[in-house]
Image (spheres, rainbow, N blue to C red):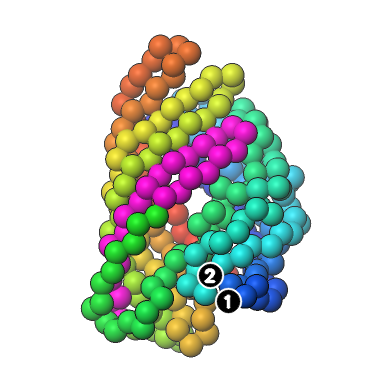
Amino acid sequence: MLVNVLISLGCEVKFAGKIGENLKLEIRIDTMAQSVESPQGTGGGAINDVKGKVFNLIISPAGKTIDFTEATKIVYSLEGSGENNLGDSFRNYFPSLATNPLKPGDTWVTNDTIDTKSPTNSVWMPVESNYKFEGIKNVDGIDCAKISSTISGTRKMTTQSQGMEIRTSGPFTGTRVLLFAVKEGYMIKDSVASKMTGTIEIADQNMNFPVVMDITSVNQIVK
């Protein structure tokens, strides 16, 4: 059974000051939508509950999310999936970069764990990323640092759907390419592609079957 899920999110990001060494950003949601295609049909559409909502996000100078509490307070509903919030979307919205000066060819390794919970969904995902600074690439007249990485880890996800608890788990691997405007100091594009091979368990129905998840995400600046 093939299921395709497409999620789109457009937002405006403004610098709103500093809290110590960390950066405070104001996020305004412009658009958000989700569509699902499956053998049972197609559903979804625009998520109007969040349009125009504004909240603050705190990140470190290197881009690591420090506080996304305000995002979790903005709640929306999806048909068939129940209530959710914007915390999942902004937990790792910005890439976390190296804190030391780099030269082309430098490599480094980071380990992080994504641990999120909402009324209908929870994700626990330890991730190891092996980064390499490829050098400077000119993109539309802007000198960008090109950083690539291989990623690996384990994904454990629990979803509440139509009164059932669905557990999805398994190992994954993937790649990531990041373009960062060096002089301007902002991200141009962040592309991630990963593949998980694991299992889906529906305990209430005594069902257990294999699953393959191909996930592609692109986070890109639009002027």
Q: Residue at x 28, y 59 (%)?
A: 150
Q: How many marks?
A: 2
Vertical arrangement, residue 169 with respect to residue 217, above or below: above
Image spot of residue 113 (x, y percent): 42, 50
Residues in magenta?
A: 113-135
Residue kind at label 2, given as amino acid type: Ser
Q: Residue at x 70, y 73 (%)?
A: 16
| Image quadrant occupied by the C terminus | bottom right
Left or right: 174 in relation to 67: left
Q: Main secondary structure of the magenta part?
A: strand
Left or right: 33 in relation to 61: right
Give the residue furthest to the left.
105
Q: Residue at x 56, y 61 (%)?
A: 66
Image spot of residue 136 (x, y percent): 34, 83
Residue assigned mark 1: 21
Which element type, helix, strand or loop, lies under badge 2?
Answer: loop
Closest to the observer: 146 or 105?
Answer: 105
Q: Is residue 204 visible?
A: yes
Q: Are marks 2 and 1 in contact (CB under 8 Å)?
A: yes
Residue assigned mark 2: 60
